[in-house]
Amino acid sequence: MPHSSSSKLIQASRRMYFGAVTTALITGITGFVGRHLAARLIESGQRVAGFDRWPSFPLQGIAYRQLDIMDVDAIAAYRRALESDPRNPDAHYNLARLLEQDGKPDLAVRHLLLYRQLTKKR
């Protein structure tokens, strides 16, 4: 399959910053932006894992888990699972509730804390 110029750019960026094939974690993966980002990352040769609270449809080639970011215990268990996996993510894209119409500052803070939890130095 020929690569578009944007996927070539993604590949070049990935090689420049990460070197080898990387694994990306996408929070909010079943949403419109998450699905399309996942497809692009896979096209560029990356492994993709993700979670969302809605199991919208099967995602081919993606390690997917249904998970609500408001469930603190589930997030802690997911973090432990990621740490024990030798292919743990090199990058995290937080797209959960990205296109929410009304502002929810408390939820934004939770998302930031979740991001910090998932990306702590191992």
Image: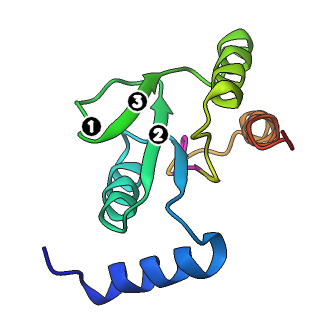
Tag 1 and tag 3, C-beta contact below 8 Å? yes
In the image, 38 versus 68, the foreground residue is 38
Q: Which residue is mark 1?
A: 59
Residue at the location (61% across, 30% down)?
A: 85
Residue at the location (49% across, 61% down)?
A: 21
Tag 3 and tag 2, C-beta contact below 8 Å? yes
Q: Is residue 30 above or below residue 24?
A: above
Residue at the location (36% across, 68% down)?
A: 44
Please report whichever mark, 3 or 2, sits nearer to the chain's N-terminal start.
Answer: 2
Within 10 Å of the Cα at label 2, are there few (<14), some (14-19), or many (20+) other Cα atoms? many
Image mark for residue 49: 2
In the image, 106 versus 63, the foreground residue is 63
Give how far across and how far down residue 90 sits, in percent: 64, 53
Tell me where the magenta segment starts and ends, as one range: 93-98
**Quarter of the image containing the C terminus?**
top right
In the image, 50 versus 88, the foreground residue is 88
Res 62 quadrant in image? top left
